[in-house]
Amino acid sequence: MNARNDFKRPFDPGFDARFVLAAAWLQFAAWVDFFVARWLERCAANVEAAQRLFETDRKPTPEAGMGASVVASSPRWEESP
């Protein structure tokens, strides 16, 4: 008598589900990396645009704190009106 097992198995016994899970995890990590990189590029572009928008004369002035105090900049500070 020739008996055969012709039933369908849920998955191949030589097939390791850990490899599929690891591959899916790597694909997910690559997807996240791609979208985070795009987000960081947009943030950097926004920062550069904001810096150009608010760009001012960067030369320091005596009033901006180059060691000059209010008393030294007013020669008649001690005099009362």
Image (spheres, rainbow, N blue to C red):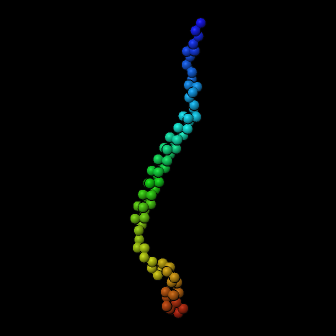
Residue 37, how many percent across, how many down?
47, 51
Residue 62 vs residue 34, the one in the foreground: 34
Confirm whether residue 41 shows in the render. Answer: yes
Residue 50, how many percent across, how many down?
43, 62
Looking at the rendering, in which quadrant would you find the N terminus?
A: top right
Image quadrant of residue 8?
Answer: top right
In this view, the residue farthest toward the front is 1
- Disc tally is 0
Residue 74, how many percent across, how many down?
49, 88
Confirm whether residue 80 shows in the render. Answer: no
Residue 36, how many percent across, how many down?
49, 50
| Horizontal side, residue 2 vs residue 46: left or right | right
Identified at 46% across, 56% down, the residue is 43
Residue 13 vs residue 35, the one in the foreground: 13
In this view, the residue farthest toward the top is 1
Image quadrant of residue 6?
Answer: top right
Residue 79 vs residue 4, the one in the foreground: 4
Identified at 42% across, 76% down, the residue is 59
Image quadrant of residue 21?
Answer: top right
Identified at 59% across, 10% down, the residue is 3
50 over 10 or under it: above or below: below
2 over 18 or under it: above or below: above
Identified at 48% across, 43% down, the residue is 31
47 over 18 or under it: above or below: below
